Image (tube, rainbow, N blue to C red):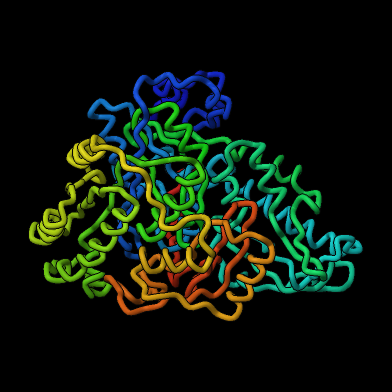
Amino acid sequence: MTLRPIHEVAQELGIADTHVIQYGKDKAKVSLEALAKPRSRNTPPTLILVSAITPTPAGEGKTTTTIGLGQALRRLGKHTSVALREPSLGPCFGVKGGGTGGGQSQLEPATKINLHFNGDFHAVSAAHNLLASMIDNHLHHGNALDIEPSRVLWPRVVDMNDRALRQIIVGLGGKSNGIPRESSFEITAASEIMAILCLAKDTEDLRERIDRTVIAFTRSRTPVTAGDLGATGAMVALLSEAIIPNLAQTTDGTPAFVHGGPFANIAHGCNSILATKMALHHSDWVITEAGFGCDLGAEKFFNIKCVEAGLNPAAVVLVATVRALKMHGGVSKKALNTPNQSAVREGLCNLEKHIENVRTFGKEPVVAINQFANDTPEELEEIQTLCKTLGVRCALSNHFALGGAGAEDLAQAVIEAARQPRTPLRPTYSREQSPTDKIRSIATTIYGADDITLTADAQRDLRLIERLGLTHLPVCMAKTQSSLSDDPKRAGRPTGFTVSVRRIRINTGAGFLVVLTGNIMRMPGLPKAPQAQQVTVLNGTINGIG
C-alpha cells in the first residue's frame, strides 16, 4: 500500500502549506492558525457521532466503523474527514491491541499512530509528572505553601497498564529523598492534563485550565493549584506542540484528524475539541467517535464535550455486532463464534436500551451492523427485525473487508438521517442541578438503575465540593465498560440495581467532577497473555500491534 504524501491530504481539505507541520512524509500537525482563516466550504458542516452497544472485551469495531463510514461518504462524493482519538499504549500491549481500526478501514501509518504518535501522549505524561515532581520538591524544601502531605491529590501517570503501581509510597530512603507519603500511578489517558488538552479551546485556555487545577490542600484545608506552585509555564511549554491537532489518513487516503486520547470508562472519552473543530472547519462531513458503549462515551460526548464546544451532531451511529449480542444473551466468550440465533434475540435488550439512550438526547440513531464472517443470515435478521420494529434505520456494513465500498449502505442511511430537521441537543442534566442529582439522572436515565448509593468517602467529597463552590460542574462518570450497570458481570439490560459511588474527584482544570463507581480502576492491569507478547520486529518492520 502506498500512502498519499501528507501535504496532498492537507490540500484536499484546503489547508495551506504554511499551516502544515510535517512529521515525515505521512503525518503532520495542522497549525491552530488554520482555524482563524475563513471557512472555504460553501455548505454548513455535518457532524456524525459513532458510538456502540456494550462491547465484548475485544471491542465491536467502533473505530473501524467510523473510518469505514468516512471512506464510504467520500466514495459517494462527500467532502469528508474523520476525527478520532489517539491510541494508548495500554490497550496496544494489553487486551485489544492497536487502536487504529483494521482491515481495509484503518488509520495510516497505523504502527506509527499506535506507537508514540507525534509524541502527544509523552508530552502529556511529562507535563503531568513534572507537576508531581514539583509538589514533592516543594514539600522537601520547606513547604512554604503549608501543603498537607496526606492531602496531595496529584498522582503520577504512565502510558502503560501496570497494576503494581496503583498504590505506591514515594520519598523512601532517607531525608535527602523527600517526604515519605502514599501516592499512586494512573494511566496517561486518565490524566487530568489529557482531559484539559482535549477540552482546551486554544493555548491561552490551556494555560488558564492548568493554572486553576487543584493539586492539594493545605493543613488549613485551603486548595492549592498548579498556578500556586509556579508550574504552569513549564507545563504549557511541554504541551505546546501536543495541543496542535494531528493529520493522518485512512487506508484509502481519506483525511483523518487524530488527536487526544482519554478513555471513556475512566475519563470523558472523546478526541480533542480543537481536532473536531479543525475537521468541521475544513470538511462538509465529519465522522467522530466516543469510546466504549453509548452509556459512557456518547453520554460524556453530549453532556460534556457538546455543551462545552457548542456541538450538535446531525446523526448518531450505533455499532452492533452479532457476537456482542450473543454475549448479552448469555453466551460465554469462548462460544461467541458459534451460531446462536436465540442468544442474539435474548441479547437485543442491550441494543434496545442504547437506542433509547440516543433518543433521550433528542437524536435518532442509525444502527450499523458490523458484519463478521461467522454471522449467519438468521442472526443478522434478528437485529434488522428489532430495528424495523423500533423504527430505526439499520444497515449491514462490511468495511473491514471492503473498505468504503462495504459501508456505502450505511453511508446512505446516515445521509438520510442527517437530512431530517436538526433537533436541539437535550442534555441529561442541567449544570444548576446538584452533583448528586446529576449522578442520579445519569444512573437512572442512561444506565437504567433504580437509584444511587454514596459511600461515606463520597459524601465527604460532596461536602468539600459544596464548600469550594464547585457544584455547578458537570460530572464525568468512571464506570465499567462491560455492563450498563457498575457490575462488569451483569450483561444484557440489567434491572433492579443501584449504582455505588465510591469517590468524587475534583478536576477544576478539566472543569468536571470525576465520579468513581463500583470497582473501576484508573490504572488497568495486563491480562495473563498480553498482546505485548505478540509484538516482533523483523528487518525493521514492527508486527503484532494491530
Residue at image coords 41%, 35%: 256
Instruction: Write down the quadrant of residue 352 in the picture.
Output: bottom left
Instruction: Write down the quadrant of residue 192 in the picture.
Output: bottom right
- Residue 449 picture location, percent across and down: 36, 73
Nearer to me, 160 or 167: 167
Residue at image coords 20%, 46%: 397
Q: Is residue 318 left or right of residue 112?
A: left
Q: Is residue 144 left or right of residue 56?
A: right
Q: Is residue 410 left or right of residue 263?
A: left
Residue at image coords 59%, 53%: 511
Residue at image coords 38%, 37%: 82
Query: Which residue is the extreme one toward the left?
Result: 378
- Residue 258 picture location, percent across and down: 47, 40
- Residue 149 picture location, percent across and down: 79, 70
Query: Which residue is the extreme one toward the front?
Result: 432
Q: Is residue 359 above or below residue 274?
A: below
Instruction: Write down the quadrant of residue 297 in the picture.
Output: bottom left
- Residue 259 picture location, percent across and down: 50, 42
The answer to whether one can see residue 159 in this image is no
The answer to whether one can see residue 312 in this image is yes
Which quadrant holds the N terminus?
top left
Query: Which residue is the extreme one toward the right?
Result: 142
